[in-house]
Amino acid sequence: MIEVSTSILSVKKGKEAETFFALEKSKTDYIHIDVMDGKFVEKDNKQIMLEYSNYIKRTLNTQLDVHLMVKDVKEAVEEFSAVEPNIITFHLEACKDKQEVMECIKLIKEFGSRVGIAIKPETKIEDIYEYLPYIHMCLIMTVEPGKGGQTLISEMVEKVSKLKSYIDKNNMEIDIQVDGGINLKTAPKVKEAGANILVSGVAILMASNYKVIIDELKK
């Protein structure tokens, strides 16, 4: 089953509430919260994303999918755990060593969320293998993290395929999420490679009818 997580990074100012309700009505599986701290990536939108998350939690029933693009993972986990996200994903590259990765995994679980680990395009897929038994999802970035509306890096499809083979071979149950440049043209390639959660922002939010795009992505 393919699920869709709609990124609200490019939501129009003044249209936030209207957009969030329309996304719920259009049956997006998750609302994807891209959290940036101005250190791990250039942009800093932590405060506004916290406000959006609080609003969505109070008014909608749609699951929250929090993607932390931050240097201080533990601090951000504590802040965003207040909105009880379904899943919190942090970047492998934000941790200095294996001990820190395991501490972040443990902390997220203690707050009651599922755990995802994200990897940037230049990070080898093999680097994530040792953590797979402890997490629920691996997020493969198909663009450089930090900006919406980028074009999918085609080599990342092979990375998805490699991860899917490893998961199947080792009989694991782990979601593979892809994020970056996902639209109706690129979605079939990543789905065929093994991704089952698609993060899409601009392709959905620019459409006149969110449901049409979301339904098509889920096919």
Image (spheres, rainbow, N blue to C red):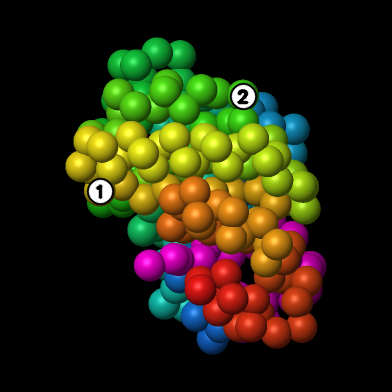
Please tell me the numbered disc located at residue 122.
Answer: 2
Graded by Cα atoms within 10 Å as few (under 14), some (14 to 19) or many (20 or more), the crowding at tag 1 reads: few
**Amino acid type at image mark 2:** Glu
Along the line of sight, which residue is nearer the eye, 217 or 107? 217
- Which one is earlier in the sequence, the residue at label 1 or at label 2? 2
Residue 218, above or below 110: below
Q: Secondary structure at mark 1?
A: loop
| Quarter of the picture holding the N terminus | bottom left
157 part of magenta stretch = no
3 part of magenta stretch = yes
Q: Residue furthest toward the top? A: 97
- Which portion, as a residue range, is magenta? 1-24
**Amino acid type at image mark 1:** Glu
| Left or right of 57 in this view: 200 | right
Residue 94, above or below 10: above
Where does label 1 land, which residue? 173
Q: Residue at point 55% right, 23% down?
A: 123
**Quadrant of res 154:** top right
Q: Residue at point 47% right, 41% down?
A: 161
Q: Residue at point 72% right, 66% down?
A: 203
Give how far across and how far down residue 3 sits, in percent: 45, 66
Give how far across and how far down residue 87 sits, in percent: 38, 52
Is any part of residue 47 visible from this angle? no
Q: Secondary structure at mark 2?
A: loop
| Left or right of 109 in this view: 165 | right
